Image (spheres, rainbow, N blue to C red):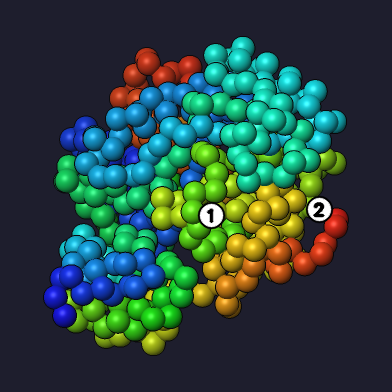
Amino acid sequence: MDKRTEICRCEEVKLGEILNAINNGAKTSKALKLATRAGMGICQGRTCQPVLEQIISYYTNQNIQETPGLSTNHPVRPLSLEELAGNRKDL
Amino acid sequence: MVVIGGGVIGTSVAYQLAKTKRKVMLIEKGEIGGQTSGSCDKAIFLQSKQPGLPIQMAKASMRLYENLEDELGMSIEFKKNGGMIVIESDTHMDAMAKFVKERKKAGMDVKLLDRNETLAWQPGLSSHIAGAAFSKEDAEVNPLRLSQAFAQAAKRYGAVVRTHTEVTDIICADGKVTGVQTTDGKIAAETVVNAAGPFASQIAEMTGIGLTIMPRRGAILITEKIEPFIHGNILCSQYIAAKHAASGDGDIPPYGIGLSLGQTERGNLLIGASREFKGYDKAVGPDVLSAIASHATRIAPALNNVNIIRTMVGFRPFTGDGLPIIDKAKAVEGFITAAGHEGDGIALAPITGHLVISLLEDEEHYKDWLKRLRLERMHEV
C-alpha cells in the first residue's frame, strides 16, 4: 500500500488522508469517518471498515476492537423513499 | 481552563479561548462532532429564527461565518446559497405573509414567492405547492468539517484536545471550581465551560446547579449521492410551526415532523426531521422514519425513487424559550454554561465563542444580549 491506495471506494478516500486524520488525533473508525468520510458511502463501511480497523491498530499500537467502531443504523440495505413512506396518508 | 463538550459549540468556545491566549483543554467523551453536531442538517437559516434577539444573534454569527474558512484555514463548505420555506397550502399563505413581513421589519431580506416563482427556483418540488418564503441571506455549512476546523485551529493556538475522556465530577472548594475529575485522571482548572449540549444538565448537576436542558430527539434520512437536486436549503411551513410550538401546544404535527432538506457537496440529500421528547433513547422506530419519508415525498415527489442509505438520530439541547444559556453560575465561581442552542447550534456556533469571551472579560459589547441568555431566566417562568 502507498499513500494513494484507495481505502474507501465509495467515498474515494486514500490512505494518505486516513494517515493525516490519525496524525490529527483520530483513534477510532468513527473518528476517521467524521474526519475523512471513509465509511459514509453507499456500502456504509461494509468494505472498508476491516481495513480501517487494521490501519488504526497498526499505526496506534492498539488491539483491534471486538465491537465494530462504526455504528450501523436503519436501513439495513438501501431503500427507496417511496418504499419507506409506504402508502401512509396521515401525514 | 476546561471546556466540556467537543461539538460545534465547545470547539468554537475552545478556539476563541485559545486564540485569546488562554490555556485550554477540551474534553470530549466521544469524538469531535460525534453527537448532536454530527447528526444535524447543514443549513444556516436566518429567516427561521424569531425576530428580536434570535435573529440578531444569527446575523452576527453569519458575519463571522463570512471569513471563517480563511480564519480557520480549512474548508468548511460554507456557501450562501439562500434558503426557502415552502408553503404547502393556500391556507398557510396568510400566516407566512405575516412571517415574511415581521422578518423584513427585523431587517432581513426575505420575500414571498408564488407557486411559479417557487417551482422555477426548485423544479424538484410538487406542483401543489402554494408558494414559499425565500431569503438569499440563508446559507449552509458542513457541520462535520466545522467542528473539526474549530478543534484543529484551537490546537494550533495551543489548546489540548482530549477525546474519549468523560468528565465524571466537577471539583469545587469554597464555592469555586478547582478542577474536573475525568475517566483519565484529574485536571486542575479555575474555569470550566459546560458546552455539553443535550448532556449539559448532567454536567451541571455535578456542581449542584439545576439546569433544565432537555434532549429533543431528531431523525434525518440520508440518501445515496444524486445530481444537484435543490438550490440552497429547504424547510416547510410545518417545520416552522413545529420548531416554535411551545410544548403542550395543540398544533404540533405527529412526531413533530417538518421538512428540512439539504444536499451535501458530495450529493447526498439530508432529509429531516422529527422533534420528540424521548429522553436519551436513540432507537427511532420505523413509524417516525416512514413519516419523514412520506412528508418529504409529498413536497418533493421526485424523491420517490431515491435510495436511503442511512438514518441518523441526535438530540437537540432544548431550553424551552428558543434561546441558549450563556452565563456564569452565581453559586459556583468559575462554572460557565454555554449550551441549549436546540436546533440553532450550527447557526450560532461562531457567535457563541465570542459571547463566552465577552462574558469572561465582562465586556460592555454584548451585555444586553448576555442579560437575556442568563441561567436565572429558566427559574422565573
Q: Nearer the viewer, residue A5 or B38?
A: A5
Find residue B272 and report its horizontal and vertical position in percent: 62, 52
- Among the 4 quarters of the image, the one containing residue A78: bottom right
Residue B157 placement, left or right of B194 = left
Q: Nearer the viewer, residue A58 or A90?
A: A90
> Looking at the image, which residue is at 67% across and 44% down?
B125
What residue did someone put label 2 on?
A91
In the image, is residue B24 above or below residue B133? below
- Among the 4 quarters of the image, the one containing residue A16: bottom left
What residue did someone put label 1 on?
B269
Q: Which amino acid type is shown beneath numbered disc 2?
A: Leu
Quadrant of the rendering where the N terminus of chain B is positioned? top left
Circle 2: element type: loop
Q: Chain of mark 1?
A: B
Q: Residues within 10 Å of mark 1 (few under 14, many from 20)?
A: many
> Looking at the image, which residue is at 30% across and 25% down?
B361
Find residue A14 and report its horizontal and vertical position in percent: 24, 68
Tell me if residue B245 can be seen. no
> Looking at the image, which residue is at 72% across and 31% down?
B115
- Among the 4 quarters of the image, the one containing residue B120: top right
The number of discs equals 2
Circle 1: element type: strand
Q: Which amino acid type is shown beneath numbered disc 1?
A: Leu
Q: Nearer the viewer, residue B353 or A75?
A: A75
Q: Nearer the viewer, residue B258 or B209?
A: B258
Quadrant of the rendering where the C terminus of chain B is positioned? top right
> Looking at the image, which residue is at 53% across and 54% down?
B269
